[in-house]
Image (spheres, grey):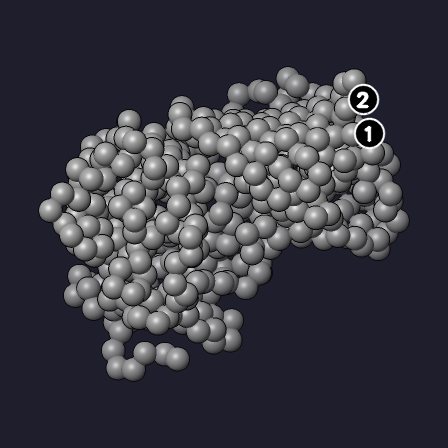
Amino acid sequence: MFRFTLIALAFVSFAAYAAPPDDQWFTVLLDGRKIGSFETTREVRAGRVVTSQTLDLSIERAGTAVGMTSKETTEETPDGKPIAFQALSKLSGGETVIDGKVHGDKVTVTSTTGGATQTRVIPWPKGAMLAEGLRLAGLAKGLAPGTRYRTLAFQPSSLDVADIETHVGDKEPVDLPAGVRTLTAVEQTMLLGGAPVKSRLWVDADETVHKLTMPVIGVDLVLLACDRACATAPNQGTDIFDRTMMVSPRALTRAELDHGMRYVLAASDSGGPLKLPQTGEQRVVAQGDTLVVEITPAPRAGEEKKPDEADFAPNDWLQSKAPDVESLAKKAATGAHDPAAQMKQLETFVRGYISNKTLGVGYASALEVVHKPEGDCTEHAVLLAALGRSLGIATRVVDGLAYAPGFAGRQRVFVPHAWVQAWVNGRWQSFDAALPGFDAGHIALSVGDGDPWRFYAGLDMLGRVSLREAAPLGGELIR
């Protein structure tokens, strides 16, 4: 499992400094290898400022190529007031479209994922801006060294707001494909989904971006301004899956994984501190620069808050009220009469229903998986979560790491993984349809609702967390 959402955060930084030129191209590099292109355009149409940003990427996961296209278009008044937006995402054949119309403090949103369309009204976040508003805010603040300010960037792809803190630095020479230019360095810290993401931009006197860097899975994602031929040149390809694995200091036995484990985790770089969620199965305590994490396969009651309405409801990725999903849920749970038995039966069903186990899908919604049963752990997780909600069971999707004795040529590694938690018997209990089941080899990094944009906290840790110790759980649990 690997999500593109952290890479797509480049949209947020560019939204904060939308380029004034009519058309600007960038080449996209990951760890020094070309993986795609980025185009940003801005034009005035009938008194409206229309800004579009298109990101095309191609990477590999354990030798399987995965492509992604993501495009956002915003419409605003000349003074930066929001009018409308659209977000289009294509990932391995699947497509998601989000259209939004802003009416004062409300937004009418129509979204289509996996063939299912829904329309709803959400509040417009107070003070939030789209591309032109953010560009004008930056121009108003200027580029004097030491200038600091905060802005709220609305993200059409996730319908979230990023709180961006900007710090203007000094001018410095920057090596670009067209030659060296002297540009102003700008540092940004974005808070989206509770995870801080830091990026660095270099802009000219008009505040047009010519370079951007941000950390992704322990390496740098870099965007460099160049001409169209440079940006759209053939990609070099890079397999990022290996970088996301965490090596275990020793092999873990089945008896240990069935009983419980204690792990000591540490950041392998100088980035932000590690943060892991507390769950009924996972207890986390900070000790100096490390985290002590205890995993017990049997959840403990009273460790987490009860589910809310959203945990039962359908959404763009868990279309639990779609007729095909409801029908499949009833069929899969036939004979099971309580939530615990139903989830266990659904877990077994999904494991067999997704017959084509492949890393080539990227990320599909539950309804897409119903119609085309293929994919990796994420497809197993979204389908299982949606089937549970169809039966009235609260569910959520967990992103984390799972232990594998061997994977993609590596031995005793923790691999990026996704599974499901369901509210049964007064507690959140984990179910894993992609593996033989949940055990103490599962370390949760973040918990969400199945939307791939909700996992920034967990994604930030991939590639930068190391396992110092792994020991069987015994005696008193940590407090």
Residue 226: percent from left, percent from top: 69, 25
Q: CA distance from mark 1 to mark 2?
A: 7 Å
Residue located beneath label 2 in the image = 47
CB within 8 Å, label 1 to label 2: yes
Q: Is residue 470 above or below residue 47?
A: below
Label 1 residue SS: loop
Residue 474: percent from left, percent from top: 25, 78
Residue 342: percent from left, percent from top: 19, 50
Amino acid on which the number 1 mark rests in the picture = Pro
Viewer-side residue, 177 vs 361 = 361
In the shown orientation, is residue 245 left or right of residue 323? Answer: right
Residue located beneath label 1 in the image = 78
Say which mark, if any, is on residue 346: none
Quarter of the rendering occupied by the C terminus: bottom left
Residue lying at the far left of the rendered structure? 335
Viewer-side residue, 466 vs 95 = 95
Quarter of the rendering occupied by the N terminus: top left
Whether residue 435 is visible, yes or no, is no
Which residue sits at x=23%, y=40%? 329
In the shown orientation, is residue 379 left or right of residue 343? Answer: right
